[in-house]
Image: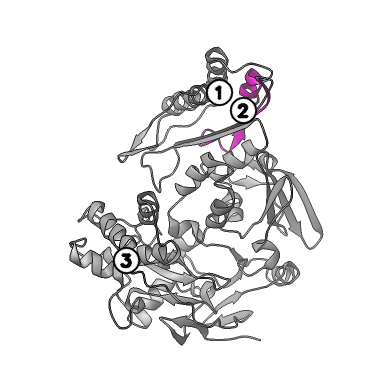
Amino acid sequence: MTKHKISLSLNGKSTQADCRPDTSLLEWLRTDIRLTGTKEGCAEGDCGACTILLSKPDGSGFSAVNSCILSMGQIEGRSIITVEGLSTQTVHPIQEAMAQNGSSQCGFCTPGIVMSLAGLLSENTSPTESDIHDALAGNLCRCTGYKPIVEAAKSVAKSGQISLLQVESKHTPTAVIDSSGSVFHRPETLKDFFAIRSANPSAVIVAGATDLGVALAEHETNWPVAIWTGGVRELCAITEDETDWHFGAAVTWSAILEKTADAYPSLGVLLRRFGSTQIRNMGTIGGNIGTASPIGDGPPALIALGAKITLASARGEHSMPIEDFFIDYRKTVLHEDEIIKSISMPKPVSGQHFRIWKISKRYDQDISTVCGAFNLMLKDDKIAAARVAFGGMAAIPRRVPTAENELMDEKPSDAVFAKTAAAIRAALKPLSDWRGSSEYRTEVAGNLALRLGAELAGETVEVMAEGVSL
């Protein structure tokens, strides 16, 4: 059964959108229904001017997302709130606070900032300054500067006058949206997914669309036939046992951050820099791995942790260490009829020391120049196991066995980590590009081994970025 209109709740009212399902939400808001408070800035999910609030799949609240790279097919059956609908009777407290302390100058970025902070305050009524900065990392303000904006958010939290956002009654989403030459399939099970894909082998597979949505937003491509993974139960599942977490490929990085940050603080720091809050709320672990980018930040961490990936097709499924998934630049072992089903991440154990560092030109929302991950197991004051992995240093994210060998069965010392650094520099031959020269990358990669040694020795290593001590 097909459905030619997209059903959703817009600012508390049931609405039907008569448009192609591969239309961006921002285009529909601004062009079709003339809600122009939501702005278009970069059209790439970077600047945050287009931020709106999207209901969570379980109806428990709202998440801030970039409407410029979000397709209409993805929001079928969901509730959205734009800046026009944030308050019905009076302005939202964050709007009032920003007006009172002059947090807006040109005002172009302000609606997106308001939406990001409203989303934060609806879930966290006592945010720390760090929480506020994290919520604003995806919102670019060129005029005002962030201090008064942060102060406005702090004043609202302190006052306790926070308007909680209520999700409207859920719509029952349709399985297929067919409109104006674009067909958007929304399967609910893997079995349904494989049946649809078998009938549509050239269909675009859409997960969070934080990558695919960029070309869509800039009208460089469209989706004649798309299959969305965000409704497939098996791909959205999070389970765990005594030793591992098991994340379905469509699980978002926000959900993974919430699950793992306390267990792996270093991973938590990385994930908070993994795009913005808006991107983490949509971007998926399977999508990040499936792009096979040599500078993706997820794979180095997962390789160092010893994660496994499960691939599935109508023929069955099989698992492998995640480092074996990557073959060459943008090439993987994934067969045409397969998808990434899940990723299993080991939980920390006694004696384990995990560190990952991302080096980039900007602290927030930037592509890695180098990303290095180290996972050591100490027993009786010696290194009993070691895994070292890097991104941005080769055509694929990769382990460095020679560096691991320098660490094995050794007591941590300056000399051992100096040898490890030398092994890393000898093994990796990165290219030069605008993010950094080959020589710079090589030197930095080795230095991360020295930093690991310093931290294990109890030294405090401080790096200043945008005035923040890391």
Q: Quadrant of the C terminus?
A: top left
Q: Residue at label 3?
A: 114
Q: Let me know if residue 383 is in the magenta part.
A: yes
- Mark 2 to mark 1 CA distance (whole Å): 7 Å
Residue found at x 62% / y 67%: 203
Mark 1 nearby-residue class (10 Å; few <14, some 14–19, many ≥20): many
Question: Which span is picked out in magenta?
Answer: 382-407
Which labelled disc corresponds to residue 170? none
Give the SS element for disc 3.
helix
Badge 1 element? helix
- Number of the front mark, 3 or 2: 3
How many labels sit on residues? 3
Q: Can you say which quadrant of the picture contains the N terminus?
A: bottom right
Residue placed most toward the observer, 67 or 84: 84
Q: Which residue is mark 1?
A: 424
Q: Nearer the viewer, residue 236 or 216?
A: 236
Q: Earlier in the sequence, mark 1 or mark 3?
A: 3
Mark 2 belongs to which amino acid? Val
- Judge depth for marks 1 and 3 and give the one in front: 3
Q: Position of residue 261 (x, y in %)?
A: 54, 47
Give yes or no for contact between labels 2 and 1 (Cβ–Cβ under 8 Å).
yes
State the separation of the CA atoms marked 3 and 2: 45 Å
Q: Amino acid at mark 3?
A: Val
Q: Is residue 93 left or right of residue 221?
A: left
Residue 48 image offset from top left, x and y in percent: 35, 61
Residue 84 colored magenta? no
**Label placed on residue 400:** 2
Work out whether residue 219 can be spotted.
no
Q: How many residues crowd around disc 3 within 10 Å: few (fewer than 14), some, or many (20 or more)?
A: many
